Amino acid sequence: MPRVEIYDTTLRDGNQGEGISLSAKDKVKIALRLDELGFHYIEGGWPGSNPKDLRFFELIREHQLKNAHICAFGSTRKSGVAADRDENLQQIIRSNVQVATIFGKTWDFHVRHALLTTLEDNLQMIEESVAYLKQQGMEVFYDAEHFFDGFAANPEYSLATLQAAEKGGAARIILCDTNGGRLPNEIFDMVSAVKESLDVPLGVHCHNDGELAVANSLAAVQAGAIQVQGTINGYGERCGNANLCSIIPNLAFKCQLPSIPEQSLAELTELSRFVSELANMHPMNNQPYVGGSAFAHKAGVHVNALLKNPHTYEHVEPEMVGNRRRVLVSDQSGLSNLLYKYQELDLGLGLDKEANRRLLEELKELENQGYQFEGAEGSFELRLRKAFHGYQEPFSLENLKILIEVRDGTVYSEAIIKINVNGQVVHTAAEGNGPVNALDNALRKALEGFYPEISGMQLNDYKVRVLDEKDGTGAVVRVLVETGDGHCSWGTVGVSPNIIEASWEALVDSIAYGLLRQENKDDIDTQKIITGVFRGKC
Amino acid sequence: MPRVEIYDTTLRDGNQGEGISLSAKDKVKIALRLDELGFHYIEGGWPGSNPKDLRFFELIREHQLKNAHICAFGSTRKSGVAADRDENLQQIIRSNVQVATIFGKTWDFHVRHALLTTLEDNLQMIEESVAYLKQQGMEVFYDAEHFFDGFAANPEYSLATLQAAEKGGAARIILCDTNGGRLPNEIFDMVSAVKESLDVPLGVHCHNDGELAVANSLAAVQAGAIQVQGTINGYGERCGNANLCSIIPNLAFKCQLPSIPEQSLAELTELSRFVSELANMHPMNNQPYVGGSAFAHKAGVHVNALLKNPHTYEHVEPEMVGNRRRVLVSDQSGLSNLLYKYQELDLGLGLDKEANRRLLEELKELENQGYQFEGAEGSFELRLRKAFHGYQEPFSLENLKILIEVRDGTVYSEAIIKINVNGQVVHTAAEGNGPVNALDNALRKALEGFYPEISGMQLNDYKVRVLDEKDGTGAVVRVLVETGDGHCSWGTVGVSPNIIEASWEALVDSIAYGLLRQENKDDIDTQKIITGVFRGKC
């Protein structure tokens, strides 16, 4: 069976998403990762539009790709300018890649209102631009911008634009739902109609403004498109582009249509998080297939059935996309969830009914105060160990003082701590860029002599959430800290109206839990499971 | 044309989402809002499963609803227990509402592996449970759990379960894609098949595990279902439920199928944010129709066309769902975006080319340092006013000191500030729950004599983002503050490696901008537009 071609436009269209700004180097890292996983086409950017994109094409040339073709994006030539004199087309040629993807106008409304030219002139612009780039030895993909809206408004003219691209020698014609407002049945019907009128293989490029981009992409494939364009995590302008992290597994597991190699599917979760880290976007927990909650179960009745057979409440196995099952403990969860947790952690916990009920009550009360153990399973496990095994923290706080001073525009932060480590009192101080950093530095300084392995642990993420917004800066805050040791990462939590106290609590748990992991290092399977927030490989 | 019935299950299924825990009072607030907007059915909870849900049914009885019917959720009776002795069914009756929604097993695999009974016994459980609740005077909706998986595996048996519910007297049969893994074309075909075999009107209940819940719900309606079940913002277990905030406008604008009254559609954006605030979930920026980015434009070429005609890059008008258009300024944006901003803010800014270029450079440099003006348009406007109108802040900092001390387990936070207000030096101090609160209190104390209107401004949200995670607690942090005055809210930003300094910067901007708004209070249209993060009505 022929493979569906996957065309990634994270580096261009994805980068248009609000809050996203990838550097040229980030783009290279992502391109290399996509290449490794067997993506077929990677759109690097629009060389004519900004220097960052130009730089990407320079940098990527230094690498030998194994699978992917890099594509340069641009538009058809300007009206009234010959193709060989059009600056935008020249930039595409200078980018020195094999594939050019150029977009043109398909919708008569756009030709008149955005391009401000005649319908006939637009047809010539399309045909000549495609033909010119092809003459220069490039493979040319033609992006029919607003195709579906254009076809609905004026089917004859929009078909004529596609025929112009075909006549020019386009290797693929990509039908775009640029404004993202079309329905799957419309997409299916229109792709089917185009397929009857053209010989060029078709692709599809959808946006998510109706929350239908994944369905629309699948409908186009079902109607005969052989290429799907989209982005990792669905990043993109407005509501984003079609999400390849959902489309690829849907094609493989639901439509039995292969695209990237089968073994790459198990890397999708890691790919999603890798790209979200480079894009500096928080991972979307509820993202299908690859999200942290995608296989997280909370309802007691579901967990009960899962204990009997996971297939009961999961559409695919989480491992197929490199994700994992999680069971949440919350005030809505019953004893089933707690028992599942015991099994998972393999701590050899007793099944004493009364003790379980007490622990569940305690956890519910803590959640009531604002604690959240979802995503802070390091703190959760420490509590279990305290309750059942009499676990004690490796140190305790006696005294803490923090000074912050702004003097003549310069800020000084200093932390003074007095802690007790196995009966020995350590009194020390450290400076930092800020109070939490000073605190972290002082704590590490005090402990390093006792636990040298601390130097291998680093803070990956630090989140603060105001819990009752109505109380303004006086509200209770929850601090979630994520710490890593280069292989695994774990989440811990602290809650207080004082951000320093909440941070202290989460930092102490993060180090205590990290030390505990070191002790049990050989037990690698358990390690994998207990990782609160699973990032990368563990 | 008959209206599509909207059945909201935010209060039950939505509440299963990771990180969501609605109180009984929150649930009442949401139910009343949904009722006002004309939702047809509101599932209040599962009275048999937890005390919070029981409490909801007590509280909601005190209110007279205008449009909606409240539904109580539960399961078919237990195997081997008579319906009139089944505790779960008794709880539904005691909830004292008009509609009972009970789920039963449709998939033979589940009957055997989760229910652990015979196929025949399950049919009796369904029929008798429905019939019993109907005898008690309730309208009964039957949720066919895992219908689509069950029908694919064993069409005869799954149809037999539906026929048992019909025989029992169900008023609606709801076909559920419980595991969320089905494709739109499958849903269409299966709903069509069921419609031929049954007389009872059908509904659909989808989950989003394949990112297809919205498409699947529409496909079911296109095949003849008259009721759609879903949640606000798509909240729900794992990847969530079908998102009513997308389905309702898709039905209205794309399928020409009315559901809730037309005038309620313009309230959807506010509804979405109202529910996300009560659920304490950060609004999803890229959410279709109602998200803060849903009509946000970044690409220079798009903005250029929008200036000519907004229809060029928007599938619907933002006002139709109560949202608004935004143009973003970023390092990828050209002069078009900046010019659009000038127009929008109506500050009477000059079009001096050189000044514009300098400002664009400055903004790009600030974004490079970690500033983000998307969502902090208060800080953005202050910068524009400084650059063009010589605006000066109403006060300046001379000195700042913060002390935090943990003594015998108690935390003390104190801020000492010296500021200059119009030439007068104020030196004062305040305590707080935490350092940022102490700072906020001291600042307000110092300024209140000069600007009494400050007491009407409150901090709504306070977010901290670690920018370069690799630097741990020493990394640069970005603080985003959202401040409100009861009508509008505005976002401001501060960036520094020191969380106190970044907070100070954002707090100063928030007050400075709030004072500026007060000055221009009569100019209400501008106020509406310049609000950085638009929450609620303004």
Image (cartoon, coloured by chain):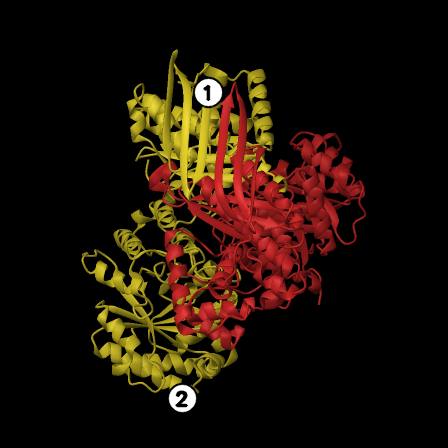
Chain colours: A yellow, B red
Residue B89: tell me if it is visible.
Answer: no
Q: CA distance from mark 2 to mark 1?
A: 80 Å
User: Residue A20: horizontal and vertical position, in percent?
Assistant: 41, 55
**Alpha-carbon neighbours of circle 2 within 10 Å: few (<14), some, or many (≥20)?**
few
Amino acid under label 2?
Glu
Query: Secondary structure under badge 1?
Result: strand
Residue at image location 26% in from the left, 72% down from the top: A91
Task: Spot the residue most to the top.
Answer: A423
| Chain identifier of the residue bearing label 1 in the image | A
Q: What is the secondary structure assignment of the residue under circle 2?
A: helix
The one nearer the camera, A105 or A431, is A431
Chain of the residue under the numbered disc 2 shown in the image: A
Of B315 and B436, the residue lying toward us? B436
N-terminal of the pair, mark 2 or mark 1, is: 2
The amino acid at mark 1 is Asn
Tell which tag, 2 or 1, sits nearer the viewer: 1
The residue at 39%/18% (across/down) is A394
Which residue, given by chain and number where applicable, does mark 1 sit on?
Answer: A399
Residue at the image position 23 percent from the left and 73 percent from the top? A93
- The image's mark for residue A120 is 2
The N terminus of chain A: image quadrant: bottom left
Query: Does B227 appear above or below A141?
Result: above
Whether residue B170 sits left or right of residue A54 in the image: it is right
In percent of width and height, residue A195 lies at 40, 74
Neighbor class of circle 1 (other Cα within 10 Å; few <14, some 14-19, many 20+) is: some
Residue A374 picture location, percent across and down:
50, 35
Q: Nearer the viewer, residue B119 or B441?
A: B441
Identify the image quadrant of residue A226.
bottom left
